[in-house]
Amino acid sequence: MPVSADVAASGPAPVVDPFGRSISYLRVSVTDRCDMRCVYCMAEDMIFLPRADVLSFEEMQRLCGAFIRSGVRRLRITGGEPLVRRGVIEFMSELGGWLGRGDGQAGLDELTLTTNGSRLAQHAEGLHKAGVRRINVSLDTLDAQRFREITRVGSLARTLDGIAAACEAGLAVRINTVAMRGVNEDEFDKLIAWCGRIGADLCLIETMPMGDTGEDRSDRYLPLSLVRARLAARWRLQETGHRTGGPARYVRVAETGRRLGFITPMTHNFCESCNRVRLSCTGMLFMCLGQDDAADLRAPLRDGATEDELLHAIRQAIARKPKGHDFIIGRRDRTAGVARHMSATGG
Ligand code: SAM
Ligand code: SF4
């Protein structure tokens, strides 16, 4: 059963960064590739990494094991689109072996996934068998034409089939929606009502300036403080202290009984409670989504580092975790923020 991040971990004490934050959450990007090209995430003509640069699943397994022994209790698999990589379900099943270990042992409290849903119909049951109980599915609109415009190549029907299969398989679903001015801001009421009907939570996300997507994102940026005020005029939003270990702050929508989350890196900096680091598919460890600094864990791994040497490299990297991100929307430079794409680090 998923365990809330508020519950004290029972294994090794997590590594603590210089600002006193315990790092108990790892996001792993298993691929930079994707079968969609969302306008806020990728350029249309993305060039993907050569396969030799990408860690094998055996290598990822070793690194994940080292993080779990360093006190990580929650692990999210992401990408690019994680379900496009062959063998990902087997990889996750192996990681699932860490779930449910208690009594002071290293182990995981939760294994989760973020996906665009395009291949969820095939994989929902496999994910459940692997020990996954909760997933995030990205969906910015319920309009097929608009979905195609935002994802450039995706199919709304496939993602909806995937979501239905996930619910059927017993996975709790949270829908992630990037809020974009003039694109989907007229649909939030509809999305809230739809999530209520299918029994999913919804989380709205502010657009972050990451990577050149060929578009000027400052036009699209929509502060969620504004959205929340608008929604409060239509729905009864009840405060809740619910946290899932991520950056979302939740309210409950009284009319639907479902949670509505807000991820607001731009209007409300959430860095002070940041408990996570991100491993890219090439083995670079990013201590902050909004900074360029990264520690190369692939080099020691491929040089035959021992378990202790890997643990040492992880501790040294976490000691470099910065206080917060430097995102600014509205600079004239389209790439303002960080140069790499969200798909490189994993959202
Ligand atoms: N492909 C999967 C998906 O779309 O869910 C997983 C990876 S995707 C990079 C993870 C999340 O990052 C998605 O919810 C996506 O909407 C979000 N995302 C991507 N680029 C973003 C940006 N520039 N600002 C805010 N969120 C972004
Ligand atoms: Fe692919 Fe996810 Fe990025 Fe969209 S947000 S392009 S689905 S990685």
Image (tube, rainbow, N blue to C red):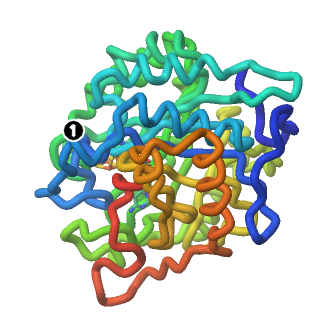
Q: Is 333 placed above or below 306 here?
A: below
Q: Quadrant of the N terminus?
A: top right
Residue at position x 44%, y 23% in the image: 91
Mark 1 C-beta closer than 8 Å to ligand 2: yes
Please tell me which residue lies in front, 90 or 181.
Answer: 90
Which residue is denoted by mark 1 in the rendering? 35
Q: Is residue 142 above or below residue 251?
A: above
Q: Residue at x 69, y 60 (%)?
A: 274
Residue 20 horizontal side relative to residue 128, left or right: right
Q: Secondary structure at mark 1?
A: loop
Where is residue 98? Give x, y as percent: 65, 22
Residue density around tag 1, few if under 14, some if 14–19, many if 20 or more, within 10 Å: some
At x 65%, y 44%, the residue is: 308
Give the total of numbered labels. 1
| Residue 215 position in % (x across, y down) | 22, 71
In percent of width and height, residue 344 lies at: 35, 55
The residue closer to the viewer here, 79 or 116, is: 79
